Image (cartoon, rainbow, N blue to C red):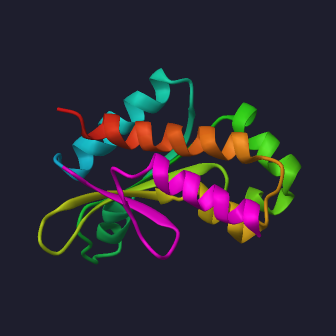
Amino acid sequence: MVKRILILLMTTFLLSSVALAENGLVSVRRNHSVAETADRLESILNDKGMKVVARIDHSAGAASVDLKLRPTELLIFGNPKVGTPLMQCEQTVAIDLPQKMLIWEDESGAVWLAYNDPGYLAERHDIRGCEGNLKKIGEALAGFARAAAAR
């Protein structure tokens, strides 16, 4: 229990420049459109050696069945060198891997980017012995989010 609290505190400290939600998501407001933020994020992920598994345009999916949805895109990405050790610590974390980042426009026109808080994943899957990996993942995700918002 103490380790989990330390992981959550460490992750919160690392991500202090972003808003942590109670539901395990880290959400940050963006200054770019959904498409531009997703383009920037995809480029950053590729530059950092991440494998972008998929980019899903939920708005386009909605439009394909004559429904409306504000701009909403999801990028799914990962790196087996990082994800595999987590799965070795607790295999059920595989349900939450590869990593995902969601970018959407809210009802007021603000654009947001969100991702799973690694501390939440540690708690959800009772991950033990991977604190270093969780710290690196938290730092990387926060860095990707910051870089996608840079002007």
Q: Is 129 above or below relative to 42?
A: below
**Residue drawn where x is 47% and y is 51% of the image:** 13
* Residue 32 on image: x %, y %: 17, 46
Residue 75 is a magenta residue = no
In magenta, the rendered stretch is: 1-30
* Quadrant location of the N terminus in the rendered image: bottom right
Residue 105 x, y percent position in the rendering:
22, 64
Left or right, 95 with reference to 12: right
| Residue 8 lies in the magenta stretch | yes
Residue drawn at (21%, 70%), measured in percent from left and top?
Answer: 106
Q: Residue at x 60, y 55 (%)?
A: 118
Residue 58 x/y as whole percent:
38, 63
Task: Determine the image quadrant of residue 5.
Answer: bottom right
For the C terminus, the quadrant is top left
Q: Is residue 16 left or right of residue 99?
A: left
Residue 28, given in percent of the width and then of the height, sits at 31, 56
